[in-house]
Amino acid sequence: MLQPRLWPVNISETNLPPVQYQLMKSGLICYLCGKNEAESWDHVPPKTLFPKKGVEHLALTLDRMSNSRGYKLPTCKACNNLLNLDEEYIRDRFSIVGQNTIARQVFKEGTQPSYMRPYERSKTVSKLDLIRRDIVTVVTTSSDGLITRKVDGIKIDSDRVDRVAIKIVKGLYYQNCGDRILDEQVFQVYWDPPNWLPELLSKQSPTVGRFGEVLSYKNVAIKDDKSGGIWWLSFYKSLGIIVVVLNPQLAEEVAKES
């Protein structure tokens, strides 16, 4: 009679996956919550925004050039998984409206297969149904009311995009400054380019970079405001978002002026 083979079980840190073990030994704290020990690596920008194959991506900054699909930052599992669905959502919507070849590739390799999966198509309301529901015709008119153009557009949930944009800014700040954005800071996200955007883009800044044609970014610090600043994010050379990080007092003053 064959006896079952018994494997010794040693519940210790050495039985953890190598990445998790190395992170635990490093003593790094999650860059998002600042409380829990890091257990995994979070990708900034989200790796779902990149093509899966066929394109070499460079993380370009003023002081480094490395083959990369973004930065890997220490995070706890809870924070790492918190926005997975939101990140997939912006991949779907941004790859649909993005105007460059990378957006088209991400759509073909990521977005399209995601709504063609059998279990997704079997849902009462599938992802494809939601995309079709949100496609709208945008009509532009002249000053005298005549229709000048009709184009197809898609509605985008700004709250979901805002959450991911703020997370990206937190990651970029951590990577470039070696510290977390202070918890008390207030985030304001703008979709429509403010009238001060040209001035922002013309300013010199050491915190500027891009990841191929997936994401470009630039930060201009706010004087006397630790971790405060104005961040410009451009996705697929098509969609621009401004994230303003302010301390509570300054945020209140700005709110009163507006």
Image: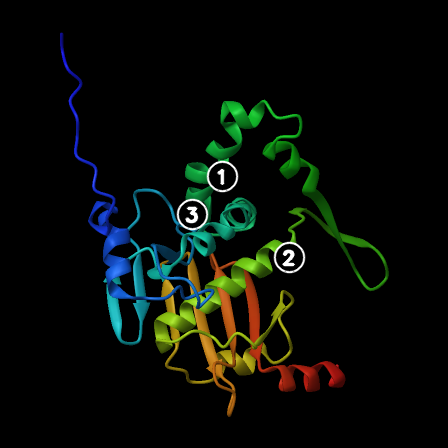
Q: Position of residue 118 (x, y in %)?
A: 51, 22
**Quarter the C terminus occupies:** bottom right
The residue lying toward the viewer, choosing from 205 and 139, is 205
Looking at the image, do the residues carrying marks 2 and 3 touch, with CB atoms under 8 Å apart? no
* Residue that numbered label 1 is attached to: 111
**Dot 3: what SS?**
helix
- Tell me which amino acid carries mark 1: Thr
Q: CA distance from mark 3 to mark 1?
A: 10 Å
Q: Is residue 227 above or below residue 73?
A: below
Please report whichever mark, 3 or 1, sits nearer to the chain's N-terminal start: 3
The residue lying toward the viewer, choosing from 79 and 224, is 79
Quadrant in the picture for residue 130:
top right
* Residue that numbered label 3 is attached to: 48
- Tell me which amino acid carries mark 3: Thr
**Dot 2: what SS?**
helix
* Residue that numbered label 2 is attached to: 159
Q: Is residue 85 above or below residue 162?
A: above
Please report whichever mark, 2 or 3, sits nearer to the chain's N-terminal start: 3
Q: Residues within 10 Å of mark 3 (few under 14, many from 20)?
A: some
Residue lying at the far bottom of the rendered structure: 224
